[in-house]
Amino acid sequence: MTTIYNFSATLINGQELKLSDLKGKVLLIVNTASKCGFTPQYKDLESLYKKYNEKGLMILGFPCNQFGNQEPGDSTEILKFCQLNYDVTFPVFKKIEVNGENEHPLFKFLKSKLPGLMGTKTIKWNFTKFLVDNEGNPLKRYAPKDSINSIEKDIIPLLNS
């Protein structure tokens, strides 16, 4: 697998999305959780999405319950939380695992292309982010604490003007 276009994932509504359908878009892929100290990042992610979506940015949210059981809800509860609390309009997917035996193949690929500190192939916490260019190439990995403003500076040069 050489690009993210070889993968698909199930949206929270049950519909399958082939990432090849997003060719030409800049992607910010994020593992999310509703009960995490970083959960308020949903607000900044949604602002970024609204600001740059028409210029080619897609944000993809992947709920995950592997870190402190901070995403315990089912799909209905997760979607309701995102919409009511943060007015999320970017695509949110069904809950997945990002590490271990049952990790989603997309995250296995992203971690292999963009390892963490000291080459680790695991995700350490919620709201780890991966920036992918408009040709499907993973470019940069961000820690949960990295600000959306710093990520925005990396996204702008990749967008359609």
Image: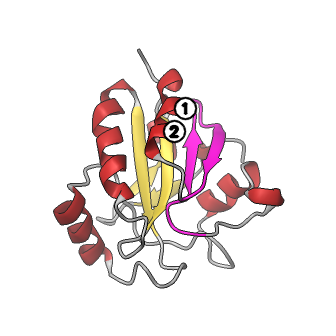
Pick whichever, 123 or 146, lies toward us. 146
**SS for dot 2:** helix
| Left or right position of 120 against 58 | right
Q: Residues within 10 Å of mark 1 (few under 14, many from 20)?
A: some
| In the depicted structure, whether residue 30 falls above or below residue 26 | below
- At x 76%, y 58%, the residue is 117
- At x 49%, y 61%, the residue is 127
| In the depicted structure, whether residue 110 falls above or below residue 5 | below
C-beta proximity under 8 Å, tags 2 and 1: yes
- Tell me the quarter of the picture where residue 82 sits: bottom left
Q: Residues within 10 Å of mark 2 (few under 14, many from 20)?
A: few
Q: CA distance from mark 2 to mark 1?
A: 7 Å
Q: Position of residue 44 (x, y in %)?
A: 34, 48
**Which mark's residue is nearer the viewer, 2 or 1?**
2
Pick whichever, 52 or 38, lies toward us. 38
**SS for dot 1:** helix
| In the depicted structure, whether residue 55 falls above or below residue 43 | above
| Left or right position of 117 against 21 | right
Q: Position of residue 135 (x, y in %)?
A: 59, 30
Marker disc for residue 150:
2
Tell me the quadrant of the picture where the C terminus can be found.
Answer: top left
Highlighted magenta segment, given as a residue range: 125-144
Residue sticking out furthest to the left: 84
Q: How many marks?
A: 2
Return the residue at label 1: 154
Magenta span has 102? no
Q: Position of residue 124 (x, y in %)?
A: 64, 69
- At x 56%, y 42%, the residue is 131
Magenta span has 126? yes
